[in-house]
Amino acid sequence: MQTFDPHAVVERLGWRYATKKFDPGRKIPADRWAALEKAMILAPSSYGLQPWRFVVVNDATLRAKLRAVSWNQPQITDASHLVVFCRRAAMTPADVERYVQRIVDVRAVPAAALEQYKNMMLGTVKGLSAEQSGAWNGRQVYIALGFFLSAAAMLGIDACPMEGFDGAKYDEILGLPAEGYHAQVVATAGYRAPDDEFGKMAKVRFADADVVKHR
């Protein structure tokens, strides 16, 4: 397994910022975008249940509608790609069964060997109210967002996580509730415009010693 130079990793993470102005003429190459999609898929989640869906919006008309309910932020239409990170509305026993079957298929293990694990997951899922389940699922989505942003930095792709949008309108425009999902957070990706003033600003973080504590 190839490893990466630690200084290079820190340098790439320091290079990234929440890009406010994208170059609309530059598109992410297909192979690099495929890697970013895979980064989202490979993100960890509680129990491995993956209570999410990643909606990549390519249609220009849809993106214009979404921009109108995103405080008219230009990243929505100007970035090469737009991803809506969606959370499962509420986990159900059927979701657990689906995941267990996926384990059986991928790992070629008998379902009986997973019975204890399945029952543990079912106990958790059944013990959550719809509101608690939605909140839990939403927290998992942010893990996938973190993977996406980090992978983008490693690939030299600019990105911007965004919560400034009307979630209910996103749900309506994309037809998410009918599929059992809700928009949680958005990320745009592409390449910064040369005149994006935010790209020239020094990154502001608290001192390492103020943030990281060793016990």
Image (cartoon, grey):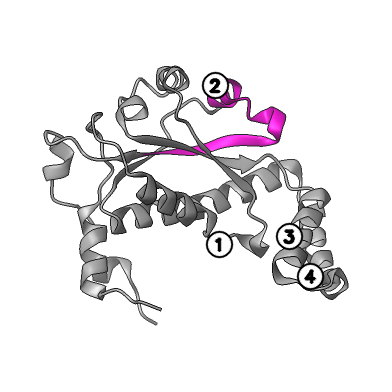
Do the numbered discs 4 and 3 sit on residues whose CB atoms are within 8 Å?
no
How far is disc 1 from disc 2 in space, using C-alphas? 28 Å
Q: Any magenta on residue 150? A: no
Do the numbered discs 1 and 4 sit on residues whose CB atoms are within 8 Å?
no
* Mark sitting earlier along the chain (1/2): 1
The stretch in magenta equals 168-188
Q: Position of residue 162 (x, y in %)?
A: 39, 37
> In the displayed structure, does residue 80 sit left or right of residue 130?
left
Q: Which residue is mark 3?
A: 102
Q: Which residue is mark 1?
A: 44
In the rendering, which numbered label is found on residue 158? Answer: none
Q: Identify the element where label 3 is drawn.
A: helix
How far is disc 4 from disc 3 in space, using C-alphas? 14 Å
How far is disc 2 from disc 4 in space, using C-alphas? 38 Å
Q: Is residue 83 in view?
A: yes
* Mark sitting earlier along the chain (2/4): 4
Res 12 quadrant in image: bottom left
Q: Identify the element where label 2 is drawn.
A: helix
Q: Position of residue 91 (x, y in %)?
A: 74, 48
Q: Any magenta on residue 181? A: yes
